[in-house]
Image (cartoon, helix red, strand yellow):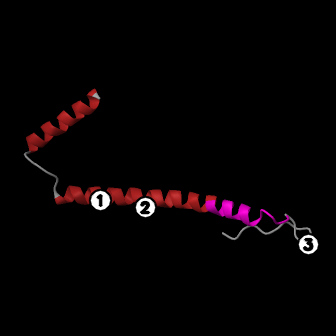
């Protein structure tokens, strides 16, 4: 907690030195771009993982009552994901 308080006081002092009272349009633009990049990265990473998990679960449900081999004795085809 002491570090957070020290960081806050540093930021307050830095703002007083520069004389700026708020963030500029450029800073807000950079913030929005960073948030968008993180969101796109998270959706990409979590989206592929979620797809794989749901595909596995769907295949298990679809094959729950089926036999594991076809008539010719070859393995049953995998779920089409």
Q: Which residues are magenta?
A: 54-67
Q: Residue furthest right?
A: 72
Q: Earlier in the sequence, mark 2 or mark 3?
A: 2
Q: Secondary structure at mark 1?
A: helix
Q: Count up the numbered dots.
A: 3
Q: Position of residue 49 (x, y in %)?
A: 57, 57
Query: Residue at 29% of width from left, 29% of height from top?
Result: 1
Q: Quadrant of residue 29?
A: bottom left
Query: Residue at 10% of width from left, 48% of height from top?
Result: 21
Q: Quadrant of residue 32?
A: bottom left
* Residue 71: mark in rendering: 3
Q: In the figure, is residue 20 to the left or right of 59?
A: left
State whether residue 1 is above or below residue 53: above
**Can you identify the residue that label 1 sits on?**
32
**Can you identify the residue that label 2 sits on?**
40
Q: In the figure, is residue 46 to the left or right of 10?
A: right
State which mark lies toward you, 2 or 3.
3
Q: Secondary structure at mark 3?
A: loop
State which mark lies toward you, 1 or 3.
3
Q: Earlier in the sequence, mark 2 or mark 1?
A: 1
Q: Position of residue 61 (x, y in %)?
A: 72, 63
Q: Residues within 10 Å of mark 3 (few under 14, many from 20)?
A: few
């Amino acid at each position: 907690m002491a570090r957070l308080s020290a960081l806050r006081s540093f930021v307050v002092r830095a703002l007083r030195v520069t004389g700026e009272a708020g963030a500029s349009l450029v800073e807000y633009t950079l913030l929005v771009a960073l948030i968008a990049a993180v969101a796109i990265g998270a959706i990409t990473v979590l989206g592929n993982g979620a797809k794989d998990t749901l595909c596995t679960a769907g295949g298990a449900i679809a094959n729950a009552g089926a036999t594991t081999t076809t008539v010719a004795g070859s393995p049953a085809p995998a779920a089409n994901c």
